[in-house]
Image: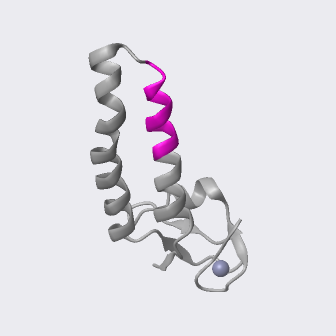
Amino acid sequence: MYPCPHCKRETISTWKKLSAGKALPAKCSNCGQKSYIGFKNQFIAQVLLGFLSFIFILPVIDYDQLWAITGIVLLALLLGKIFLLDRPMEKF
Ligand SMILES: [Zn+2]
């Protein structure tokens, strides 16, 4: 669980935090206030994933190395952890 930026109680689940954007903010079950992950962090994570995926996409396309798809999944998990889960949420 992750802390709500309003009341500081750990009420935000991992899935709620990952899916909390400005259009669909996470609602705290303690204080009822809304919060979301800032656009900047979402943007950085998506751009990095887009660029770094090419490291793994090329072996898949050119040499039929399907193991490289695992690399894209691990990369997405790592970037999600660094830029989404480890960053504090913003108050709505
Ligand atoms: Zn709260």
Q: Is residue 24 magenta?
A: no
What residue is drawn where x is 32% and y is 37%?
55
Q: Answer left or right for 69 relative to 12.
A: left
Q: Answer left or right for 42 relative to 29.
A: left
Q: Is residue 79 above or below residue 60?
A: below
Quarter of the view holding residue 64 = top left
- Ligand 1's quadrant is bottom right
Residue 5 image position (x, y, % from top left): 58, 82
Q: Answer left or right for 49 relative to 70.
A: left
Outermost top residue? 64
Residue 22 image position (x, y, % from top left): 39, 67
Residue 88 image position (x, y, % from top left): 54, 76
Task: Pick the quarter of the image with the C terminus.
Answer: bottom left
Task: Pick the quarter of the image with the N terminus.
Answer: bottom right
Prevailing secondary structure of the magenta residues? helix
Q: Give 33 or 61, whichever is nearer the viewer.
A: 61
Q: Give 44 or 18, whichever is nearer the viewer.
A: 44
What residue is drawn where x is 59% and y is 68%?
27
What number of labels is visible?
0
Q: Is residue 72 magenta?
A: yes
Quarter of the view holding residue 28 = bottom right
Outermost bottom residue? 7
Q: Is residue 78 above or below residue 63?
A: below
What residue is drawn where x is 53% and y is 47%?
77
What residue is drawn where x is 46% and y is 64%?
83
Q: Give 48 or 20, whichever is nearer the viewer.
A: 48
Q: Answer left or right for 16 relative to 70.
A: right
Q: Which residues are drawn in magenta?
A: 66-75
Residue 65 image position (x, y, % from top left): 41, 18
